[in-house]
Image (cartoon, rainbow, N blue to C red):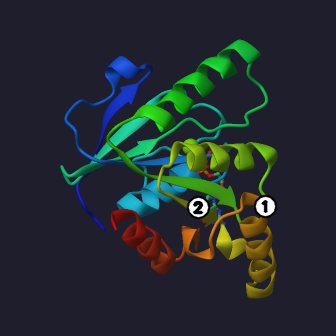
Amino acid sequence: MHRQAELAVMAASEEAYPKDGRPEAAFVGRSNVGKSTLLNALLGRKKLAYTSAKPGKTRTINFYLVGEEYYFVDLPGYGYAQIDKKTRAAWERQMNGYLKNRETLAVVIQLVDSRHIPTELDVKMTQLLQKAGRPFLVAATKRDKLSNNQWQQMKGRILKKLDIAEEQLYPVSAMDKNSIFALRDAIIE
Ligand SMILES: Nc1nc2c(ncn2[C@@H]2O[C@H](COP(=O)(O)OP(=O)(O)O)[C@@H](O)[C@H]2O)c(=O)[nH]1
Ligand SMILES: [Mg+2]
């Protein structure tokens, strides 16, 4: 878990992406879903991926080099309302281009909030990944905020709405190390 990890590249455009050919696992989800928190938990760090007070702050694609072996890639959060259309369109182009075309992208982890039924934007993202033929996992974040019964109910709804297999869905909580280990093992596999 406590592998050496460092923010290697903050890329505002494709030219800046790493060219060393190391495999990548990319993380994508709505702003505030808990992406920075999950990255920190996976990397066993407190503040590598900054948890943001301001949603939508991360505009670059951030590449964290983990143990010299592979990258964790932090994609900009989607669904942030308070940006103009032009800026949003530019982000979407960059992100979709990355997800569709990036050769070294081995797996995508899509984050959804375990308390909420996935939105249309979440569904759109899942469909993009399916169409692109990308291996992907879905992490349902903030699992600690639900009782077991509530989770069982939400789990069914998430599976149905995203139309994914149960084996693809990983409930995670930043406070529950075992949930983080389980997701990490799946990513590595
Ligand atoms: N209870 C709980 N809160 C979480 C968890 N993960 C994230 N949060 C909280 O959700 C908010 C957004 O988290 P952040 O990681 O900044 O989301 P991001 O915008 O997707 O990067 C913060 O207040 C976090 O403390 C979790 O597993 N459990
Ligand atoms: Mg963040």
Q: How many marks?
A: 2
Q: Nearer the viewer, residue 17 or 161?
A: 161
Mark sitting on residue 138:
2
Disc 2 is placed on an element classified as strand
Q: Is residue 134 visible?
A: yes
The kind of residue on which mark 2 rests is Val
Q: Looking at the image, is mark 2 or mark 1 earlier in the sequence?
A: 2
Give the quarter of the figure containing the N terminus. bottom left
Give the left or right position of residue 158, taking residue 173 as reference.
right
Q: Is residue 146 visible?
A: no
The kind of residue on which mark 1 rests is Lys
In the rendered view, tell whether residue 115 sits above or below residue 151: above
| Badge 2 residue CB within 8 Å of ligand 1 | no
Give the left or right position of residue 25, taking residue 169 as reference.
left
Q: What residue does disc 1 label?
A: 161
Q: Residue furthest top?
A: 86
In the rendered view, tell whether residue 180 sits above or below residue 77: below
